[in-house]
């Protein structure tokens, strides 16, 4: 099995993301879905040995795996996506410390449902199924596809 390059992933992902409205929806929803999934993982109870280490939770462990996937795809993109992941992590830690806000799990659950409704509306407008129906790995390609666009705009190589 041949390893796909970032550009190969992006080209395949881009086939079902041509409509400008669908692209706009993805620019808003994909980063937020990444954030709320991290939030949901954050809220899963951890065993005692993990609880003894501040901020060691399922979001932390999954972030290591996800950034590892990006590192294998493109070390350059992994830096940007790692920084984005860290920003999400900081936002979740901040949210968790606030009083008077809805619980993190509730906020993330509602966000997850609403954001995915918009994603499916975008694909309905596009007239094509989401890429992850073909390959589950495309759930990780969405954020990388957006980061790849930012890198190209900034002239940062990632291949």
Image (cartoon, rainbow, N blue to C red):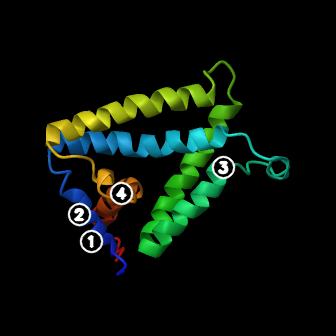
Badge 4 element: helix
Badge 1 element: helix
Q: Name the residue beneath numbered marker 2.
A: 12
Q: Name the residue beneath numbered marker 3.
A: 58
Image spot of residue 82 (x, y percent): 53, 61
Q: CA distance from mark 3 to mark 4?
A: 21 Å
Which tag, 2 or 3, sits closer to the chain's start? 2
Left-right relation of 10 to 101: left
The image's mark for residue 138 is 4
The part of the image, by quadrant, that contains residue 105 is top right
The crowding category of the residue bearing disc 3, from other C-alpha atoms within 10 Å (few below 14, some 14 to 19, many at least 20), is: some
Q: CA distance from mark 1 to mark 3?
A: 30 Å
* Mark 1 and mark 3 residues within 8 Å of each other at the beta carbon: no
Q: Name the residue beneath numbered marker 1.
A: 8
Quadrant that contains the C terminus: bottom left
The part of the image, by quadrant, that contains residue 152 is bottom left
Q: CA distance from mark 4 to mark 2?
A: 9 Å
Badge 3 element: helix
* Mark 2 and mark 1 residues within 8 Å of each other at the beta carbon: yes
Give me the residue at 55% from left, 46% from top. Answer: 88
């Amino acid at each position: 099995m041949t390893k796909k390059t970032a550009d190969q992933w992006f080209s395949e992902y881009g086939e079902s993301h041509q409509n400008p409205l669908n692209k706009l929806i993805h620019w808003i929803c994909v980063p937020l879905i990444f954030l709320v999934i991290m939030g949901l993982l954050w809220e899963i109870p951890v065993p005692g040995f993990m609880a003894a280490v501040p901020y060691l939770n399922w979001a932390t462990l999954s972030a290591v795996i996800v950034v590892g996937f990006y590192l294998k795809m493109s070390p350059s993109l992994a830096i940007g996506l790692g920084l984005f992941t860290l920003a999400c992590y900081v936002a979740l830690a901040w949210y968790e410390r606030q009083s008077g806000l809805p619980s993190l799990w509730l906020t993330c659950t509602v966000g997850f449902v609403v954001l995915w409704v918009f994603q499916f509306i975008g694909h309905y407008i596009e007239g094509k199924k989401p890429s992850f129906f073909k390959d589950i790995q495309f759930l990780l390609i969405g954020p990388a596809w957006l980061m790849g666009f930012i890198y190209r705009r900034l002239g940062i190589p990632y291949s």
